[in-house]
Image (tube, grey):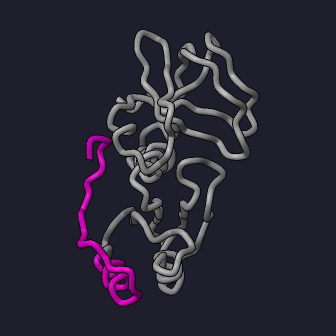
Amino acid sequence: EQHGAEARMLPIARDNQASLEAAFKLCAGADLIVTIGGASVGDHDLVAQVASDLGLERAFYKVAMRPGKPLMAGKINGVPMIGLPGNPVSSMVCGHIFLLPAIRTMLGFNPEPQPRLTATLAQDMPANGPREHYMRARVENGVITPFGRQDSALLTVLSKANALLIRPVDAAGAQKGDTVQFISLG
């Protein structure tokens, strides 16, 4: 809502087809459908299947980023849908990267993603792997310090972060003093 959208909170759907179908019916009249959880491939991750049964035209499923790989998007009966991961940190990161630009576009604002800012790296970092990594970090006085533990289950790290340090796919190691990109969480 702080970005101009009017949210309609629906009841939590259970991990079964009937409950999910009922939840999707409650979305009637929405301009955008956002789900949280159930988008992966576990036995109880039924959102993608139920949405497909209801006519989802999937635009994509899974992205090469961490946290947040099990993300999906598409349209159900012409209404855009974004299926965020169930992990809270993954959901928040995907919300900043995908959901906020979608909302801004729908409201007629600049469709650009959140601006990538720059800061000086406070410490050396190892090379990155095959997925873009959005690391929880803290920026103070133009210097960015990533938190040592980046496990997406660590909500305390998220609560202390004011930035997401962006590590590109297959990036070489970075040195203290290098200029790096980040997205502000403030």
Q: Is residue 77 above or below residue 158?
A: below
Between 32 and 96, the one nearer to me in the picture:
96
Q: Say left or right for 142 vs 41.
A: left
- Camera sees residue 102: no
Q: How many marks?
A: 0
Extreme bottom residue here? 18
Q: Is residue 58 above or below residue 22?
A: above
Query: Residue at image x 39%, y 86%?
Result: 16
Query: Residue at image x 32%, y 41%?
Result: 3
Between 112 and 126, the one nearer to me in the picture:
126
Q: Say left or right for 126 vs 18.
A: right
Check residue 89 for magenta coloring: no
- Quadrant location of the C terminus? top left
Residue 175 in the image, given as x and y percentages of width and height: 67, 16
Q: Say left or right for 91 vs 170.
A: left
The quarter of the displayed image where residue 181 is located: top right
Check residue 20 for magenta coloring: yes
Q: Is residue 123 above or below residue 171?
A: above
The quarter of the displayed image where residue 127 is located: top right
Residue 115 in the image, given as x and y percentages of width and height: 51, 29
Residue 145 in the image, given as x and y percentages of width and height: 49, 21
- Magenta highlight: main SS: loop
Extreme front residue here? 149
The quarter of the displayed image where residue 166 is located: top right
Between 149 and 85, the one nearer to me in the picture:
149
Query: Residue at image x 40%, y 45%?
Result: 154
Q: Which residues are magenta?
A: 1-26
